[in-house]
Image: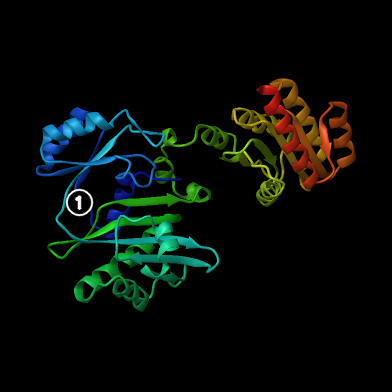
Amino acid sequence: MNLHEYQAREILAPYGLVFPPGTVAYSPQEAEAIARRLGGKVAVKAQVHLGGRGKAGGVTLADTPEQVLECAEALLGTTISGHKVRKVLLTETVAVAKEFYLGATLDRPKKGVTLMGACEGGIDIEQAARDSPDSIVRVTADPFMGLADYQALQLATGVGLRGDQARSFASISKSLLAAFLDNDCSLVEINPLALTTDGLLVGLDAKMVIDDNALFRHPILAKMRDSGEEEPLEARARQFGVNYVRLDGTIGCVVNGAGLAMATMDVIQAHGGAAANFLDFGGGIKAAEVTPALRIVLADRNVRVILFNIFGGITRCDVFAQGLVAGLAELQPTVPIVVRLVGTNEKEGRRILEEANVQLAENTSQAAEMAIRLADQFEKAAT
């Protein structure tokens, strides 16, 4: 779950991280009133779940409340890279001497949390890692022992800081890790982290991504979810308890098990196709759960064929088959359906689907080949 900048600032502030004063506005008039209270030069920042807002025109500077009003009118209600701007954050500006990057991310291969620092702020860290990996300083904190003092100072000196400023950067790094762990994050960034002309380190932007699987432990964070910023089909899938991620291919995938879903997508790609989604509706699906999953995939207009790849371990193949036949009868899809079915009560499940004239494949590879061929045929027929 992504958080807006103003929400991340709210969470990080109690950990001792400093940000310029700021308030969210939902209308141009409210923005103007906030600017009058803040006084001086103000940054007007669109609150959307999008990286690189500044380059996309989502961040502007204004010298007067009247200019803030104009900026807010220009931003609110518009769309930036597909994201509608519904609110803006107004913050005081600071005199910046230098900008840095500081972030923490879950590092599965290293079984810890890796903190990264860079001597340039406002950068795309992924691109920077590809273009100039040596410019990024990395240390990995043990999730139980935390970030050692020497590691925190290694980050600070690695980005070029010395003395009190290095110690301040090290302290912020430890606070960032504490916030990361306490809130079950997968990513936290302060970018840029600015060194002001007064010698203070101040966060000018903040990003937090919370692990959805941990939200049951954080009811306050769960209430911060902005459904308006999410892909509509993904939001709908979450209501049904389905793990769904929309992609840009044409083959809809419905699979029981995350690992099998990933393997199915890989096989489709290996045969020259592209998945329209990742969808895992769990290892122990019931017949009634098939229809909601089918409805979600069919709502994507890019889908030209749907491939069901079902392993009947906990799930019984005949129960799935009954659910699919019921779903097909209710939804009447016009796109072809391909099913690979193996496991418990497989023979009975295949019999049910054969009687319903569903196309069956013997294995995942054959299912992918059939799906790709049928998708091409459907596309040609449609044109």
Vertical position of residue 282 compared to residue 136: above or below: above
Vertical position of residue 114 compared to residue 185: above or below: below
Vertical position of residue 173 compared to residue 75: above or below: below
Residue 232 vs residue 37: left or right?
right
Mark 1 Cα within 10 Å, few/some/many (few <14, many 20+)? some
* Residue visible at 39% across and 60% down in the picture: 128
Give the x, y percent position of residue 148.
Answer: 38, 75
Give the x, y percent position of residue 314.
Answer: 76, 47
Q: Which residue is mark 1?
A: 20
Give the x, y percent position of residue 222.
Answer: 44, 43
| Quarter of the C terminus within the rendering | top right
Instruction: Say whether residue 225 is visible.
Output: yes
Provide the secondary structure element on which disc 1 rests. loop
Nearer to the camera, 148 or 78: 78
Nearer to the camera, 348 or 274: 274
Nearer to the camera, 378 or 284: 378
Q: What amino acid type should be assigned to the residue bearing mark 1?
A: Pro
Give the x, y percent position of residue 124.
Answer: 38, 55
Q: How many marks?
A: 1
* Residue visible at 47% across and 67% down in the picture: 143
